[in-house]
Amino acid sequence: MRVALDLHIHTLLSPCAGIEMIPINIVMKVQELGIDMIAITDHNAIGNVSSVINCAKIYAPELKVLPGMEITSREEVHILGIFPNLESAKELESIIHSHLNSIPDRDYTTEQLIVDEDANFIKYEEHFLLGATDFSVEEISDLIHSFNGLVIPAHIDRESFGLIYTLGFFPPNLKVDAIELSKFATEEDLETIKPSIPFRVPIIFSSDAHFLSDISKPRTFLDLEEKSFEALKKALRNYKI
């Protein structure tokens, strides 16, 4: 089946995201735009993933929601981890939280809201999610893979937090399953970036949505045997753009 994907969507748990990024709004918006599979990828946390999964089961049972996380390396590079199940994601989250930088003077934690599927407040996330971990890019890749996750460097066409611009090169031995370009990336951007990548790898486009208006019509379509993590993983092995 032909599946439309957006593997980079934040909820109101990310302190840089809008308060409107509650489960029902996300589910309704992606359904309206014809997106079949999404990943919830808040900064360094998975606290709202289960709420979006539960919401989709009620209001959009055809929508597949995958657990994810956007992890910040010590070099200030953003790496997406997409996981086969909540248990794996939760185990890695615990490790990530123990390696995050301390909270700054301003208390951002009051903006890091964990809610249920109906957007009822549950608690504040106590860890400072906009901080960087003390893990290198390579260590984050290895960690994600150790939990059977997919490794996708985020928005590599961007100067801020993008792998190539931040490091100055693409590490030749970095193990990734795909590379993400932002929804604003053009074909010219794609052709400019390709020579910097030392090996063949799938390139996908995602919205990196922090606000409802950021969620856009999908630019990545894959032929999957079914809407599942394993089918996605298999398809990425054979997908080239």
Image (tube, grey):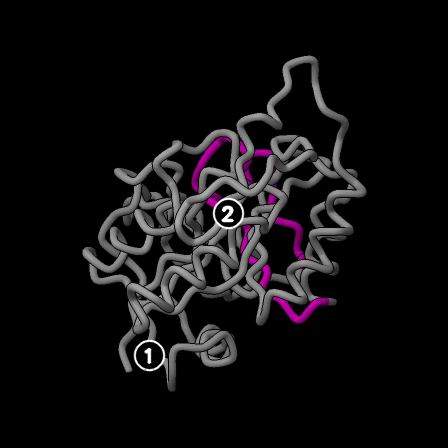
Give the residue type at disc 2: Ala
Q: Residue at x 38, y 83 (%)?
A: 226
Q: Quadrant of the N terminus?
A: bottom left
Direction from residue 49 to residue 133 in the image, left or right? right
Residue 62, label in figure: none
Q: Is residue 144 above or below residue 171?
A: below
Q: Which residue is mark 1?
A: 223
Give the residue type at disc 1: Asp
Q: Which residue is mark 2?
A: 154
Whether residue 92 is visible to the viewer of this picture, yes or no, is yes
Q: Nearer the viewer, residue 70 or 142?
A: 70
Q: Residue at x 58, y 65 (%)?
A: 83
Q: Position of residue 54 (x, y in %)?
A: 44, 63
Is 162 within the magenta? yes
Q: Is residue 13 above or below residue 80?
A: above
Q: Quadrant of the C terminus?
A: bottom left
Q: Residues within 10 Å of mark 2 (few under 14, many from 20)?
A: many
Is 126 within the magenta? no
Whether residue 173 is visible to the viewer of this picture, yes or no, is no
| Quarter of the view holding residue 99 | top right
Sequence order check: which comes first, mark 1 or mark 2? 2
The rendered magenta stretch, by its main secondary structure, is classed as loop
Q: Is residue 95 above or below residue 167?
A: below
Q: Nearer the viewer, residue 112 or 130?
A: 112
Q: Residues within 10 Å of mark 1 (few under 14, many from 20)?
A: some
> Magenta stretch?
147-174
| Quarter of the view holding residue 36 | bottom left
Direction from residue 93 to residue 186 in the image, left or right? left
Q: Residue at x 29, y 63 (%)?
A: 59
Question: Label 2 near label 1: C-beta < 8 Å?
Answer: no
Q: Position of residue 213 (x, y in %)?
A: 26, 38
